[in-house]
Amino acid sequence: MHESLIIELLGMRVDLSVVLMLIVSCAVVFLIAKLATRKLSVENPGKMQNFMEWVIEFVQNQIAGTMDMKKGRPFVTLAVTLIMFIFVSNMLGLPFGIVIHPHSVAEATVFGHPILPAVEAFNAAAAAGTEAHVEVAIWKSPTADVTVAMTLAAIVFILVHFLGITKNTKAYFKHYFEPYPVFFPINLIEQFSSLLTHGMRLYGNIFAGEVLISVILKLAAVNVVGLIASIPLMMVWQGFSIFVGAIQAFVFTILALVYISQKIDTHEEH
Amino acid sequence: MDIVWSSTIITLIAFLILYWLLSRYAIGPLLSVMEKRRELVLSQLKEASTTRDEAAAYVTQQQEALQQARKEAYDIIEQSRQTSSKQADQMIAQAKDETARLKDEALRDIESEKNKAMAALRGEVGRVSVQIASKLIEKEIDEKTNEGLVDQYLKDVGTQS
């Protein structure tokens, strides 16, 4: 299994690969969006502008499907940012991965800081008296990291409850005691379980995809038969991962919109 | 599963920056352009419908004008037909009058010629009869005094005949 590139910085554990991949993801998303809107034209949009408009219209249609479009207008940018960021993040880990193989505690450093999980693994192996085989992933999907995925879900969670409390106060609090006050604990659990599933669904799908990719790579490294067998497997799984990445970006965004709509118009039963 | 809390903060910051950048530099301008296009399309639709209404009004107007022109042309033809037929009638009547007048004139001429001839004949007959009578009866008769007598006699004969 790949270890994370965690180092200690200013008394905090910092995952450098997450930092790197977040920067790459944000840069790619911003670059795509900026290139698409470089030469904006009302009457004669270019191909890239058309693509970006298609994305926005797609998101607008989804918003219109989950809530009143008048109330949903402020969330267009949020939803577009979410779907583009998650989609690009999901795709980043697919074409290649960068993994380093330190062979000793002394080698397991980055910028002079020890890579903590690698050091732990070496120590554990030394304690058990076995040879440690450590792999540290640098390049991976940021959404394949549980913290990133859960943070995205938490952003939505906080926004949703903030909107519910400020815009729809009475219905928001009443909602917890429906249909009977006895249901209060269940309703409370429901909120947190939706947060958990929201983040974990994304993390699990992408992480599993990358795990299988690394498994197929290991198969390719076994022998010639494994190499030949791994090629079609890799093709199929890469294609499926693209599909899964797109679907998960879509699902995450849709769920965010559904949660928002549940909280800002609760005049109807849910 | 290893939660690295610093990643939470970094993800949050990265996401917020990305959101801000996108809304400021990409999605915001694009949305305003899309809105402008929507307005453009709406205004063009409105313009098209006004133009269509105008065109329909023009067509009605043109049809009316055409109808008017056709009616006028018909009127003119009708009028000219009436005028020509009246003129023809007039000409025929004139011609009739003319012929009647000519006939009357001719008749009058004939009458006067006849009278003239009769008067001349009457004079001649009177003179000849006086000559014959004077020769026959060898009696001197003043031609001049007897002329009135013969005239009178012949006039009586003329009225009786």
Image (cartoon, coloured by chain):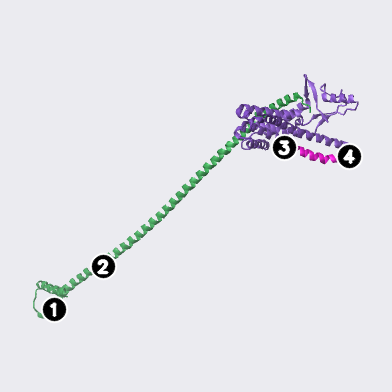
Q: Which mark is residue A31?
A: none
Q: Is residue B147 magenta?
A: no
Q: Which chain is purple?
A: A
Type of amino acid at the residue the image marks with label 4: Val
Q: Residue tagged by mark 3?
A: A247
Type of amino acid at the residue the image marks with label 3: Ile
Whole-percent x, y for residue A200 in the image = 74, 32
Q: Which of the 4 image quadrants contains residue A222?
A: top right
Between marks 4 and 1, how big is the CA–CA gap? 182 Å
Q: Residue tagged by mark 1?
A: B132
> Contact (CB < 8 A) between labels 4 and 1?
no
Q: Chain of mark 2?
A: B
Q: In the picture provided, is B123 more to the left or to the right than A102?
A: left
Q: Which of the 4 image quadrants contains residue A207?
A: top right
Asked whether the residues under marks 2 and 1 belong to the same chain, the reply is yes
Q: Which mark is residue B106?
A: 2
Type of amino acid at the residue the image marks with label 2: Ala
Chain B colour as displayed: green
Q: Is residue B155 visible?
A: yes
